[in-house]
Amino acid sequence: MSADRVVQLRWEPRHVADDGRVELSYPGISVVCRRQGEIVDRKWVPVGEEPTFADDEALIAILHAAWRWSRPAA
């Protein structure tokens, strides 16, 4: 990882309002890529109490891409 490219993971629930009366909250992980302090990409992956294989694979793919991005160019 280079100093100018940083990947941050953050527990970040999403809140959704339904017709202004009911608010639902979904837990998830936010993967934020920053270059020289500025956000250049942000992905959010839901995390349920019983994640599926597909959920796990989606998170692994996003993390893999973010960490590859953080490496300095060859």
Image: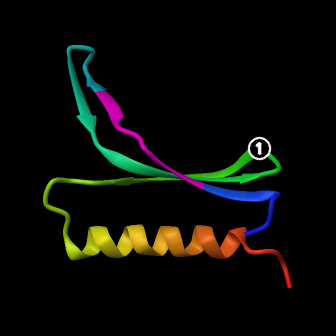
60 relative to 49 in the view: left or right: right
- Up/down of 41 relative to 18, above or below: below
13 inside magenta stretch: yes
Question: Residue 49 falls in which quadrant of the image?
Answer: bottom left
Q: Look at the image and tell me in which quarter the N terminus lies.
A: bottom right
- Up/down of 6 relative to 2, above or below: above
Residue appearing at x 13%, y 60% in the figure? 50
Name the dominant secondary structure of the magenta segment. Answer: strand
Residue 12 in percent (x, y) is at: 40, 40
Residue 24 in percent (x, y) is at: 22, 30
Give the residue at the far left of this rendering: 50
Give the residue at the far bottom of this rendering: 74
17 relative to 45 in the view: left or right: left
Q: Look at the image and tell me in which quarter the C terminus lies.
A: bottom right
Residue appearing at x 35%, y 76% in the figure? 57
21 inside magenta stretch: no
Q: Amino acid at mark 1?
A: Glu
Instruction: Give the colour scheme of this rendering.
Output: rainbow
66 relative to 4 in the view: left or right: left
Residue appearing at x 81%, y 59% in the figure? 3
Q: Which residue is mark 1?
A: 38
Residue appearing at x 25%, y 19% in the figure? 19
Q: Residues within 10 Å of mark 1 (few under 14, many from 20)?
A: few
**Disc 1 element:** strand
Residue 63 in percent (x, y) is at: 50, 68
42 relative to 48 in the view: left or right: right
The boundaries of the magenta stretch are 8-16
- Up/down of 58 relative to 4, above or below: below
